[in-house]
Image (cartoon, rainbow, N blue to C red):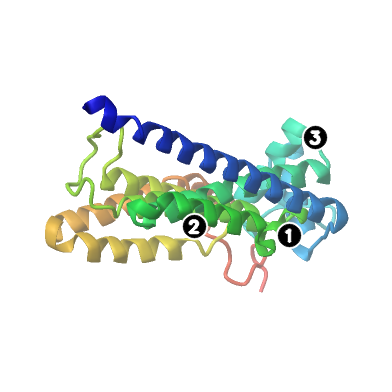
Amino acid sequence: QEQVHEAPIIPARRGGVTVLCANAFLAILAGLALRLLFAFRFPASAGDSQIYLQLARNWADHHVYALWVNGHLVPTDLRMPGYPAFLAGVAMILGRSLRAIVLSQAIIDLGACLLAAALSAALAPVSARRRVAIAALWLAATCPFVANYTAVVLTEVLTTFLATAALVSLAMGLMPDAPEPGFSTSHWRLTPLALALLGSFLTGVATLVRPEMPLLLAAAVVVYALRWWRLWGFRKILLTGVAMAGAFLLPLAPWTARNLITLHEAQILAPRYATMPGEY
């Protein structure tokens, strides 16, 4: 009897997985074609592009995070260091060309599409997760409003990827599967606290690319407090908030220390008015 009941279930699951994989492959293929279209047919540049490229080159060549001013290298905190570090890494691995940058950004943006599908599936009812994931992947892969940024040297693509990765972790931490805070795992699944810390850390990494990303963590802390208030209590909520803040600040610590040592200022983010040190 067990064999009779199980027989029709297994092919259905396999068929669903096959449909999901086929849709994922086609969506990624369409998304890649769209991004290559922007990269090769509509390449663009912006005012910040040269700043990011110069910061990356000076960092790689002269080992200093600085800009050329009147023939001299001047250390600066004008822009966050995450994107110049990405550009320097691409140059070291793939060579110094705009094509290498835009192709790398296309791959990263497709990764963000997969993360968007995972986020949508996590928020959807169990019975609809597969359909929601497929729809979200197609929408993300074919949406031109982020895809066009793959063709320009700007922070949007990398920020979108990191912010979406942080949102996936933070959203999964709100699921009621493992309500008690802690670091133990069950069936290789992270607990809400571990997911919250991972999301906070990824938000800190995203802040190294764009200085407004702490707003994401602020919203997450409020949502976590409202979600777990009755179950965890004030003390556990407070400790969780402190732990999330620590995980967020961890990737920002080297940048803050550099600004304190080199520029003699306690700058965690970037200057409010995007000025050079000492500039009005």
In the rendered image, residue 113, in percent from the top left (x then y), is placed at 58, 51
Q: Nearer the viewer, residue 15 or 198?
A: 15
The 10 Å Cα crowd at callout 3, few under 14, some 14 to 19, many 20 or more, is few
The relative height of residue 199 versus residue 215 in the rendered view (above or below) is: above
Amino acid type, residue under disc 1 in the picture: Asn
Residue 204 in view here: no
On screen, residue 110 versus residue 2, left or right, reads right
On screen, residue 218 versus residue 45, left or right, reads left
SS type, badge 2: loop
SS type, badge 1: helix
Disc number at residue 95?
3
Separation of marks 1 and 2 at Cα, in angstroms: 30 Å
Disc number at residue 148?
1
In the rendered image, residue 157, in percent from the top left (x then y), is placed at 64, 54
Quadrant for the C terminus in the image:
bottom right
Amino acid type, residue under disc 2 in the picture: Ile
In the rendered image, residue 97, in percent from the top left (x then y), is placed at 83, 42
Query: For the view shown, which residue lies furthest in the right direction?
Result: 41
Report which residue position mark 2 lands on: 268
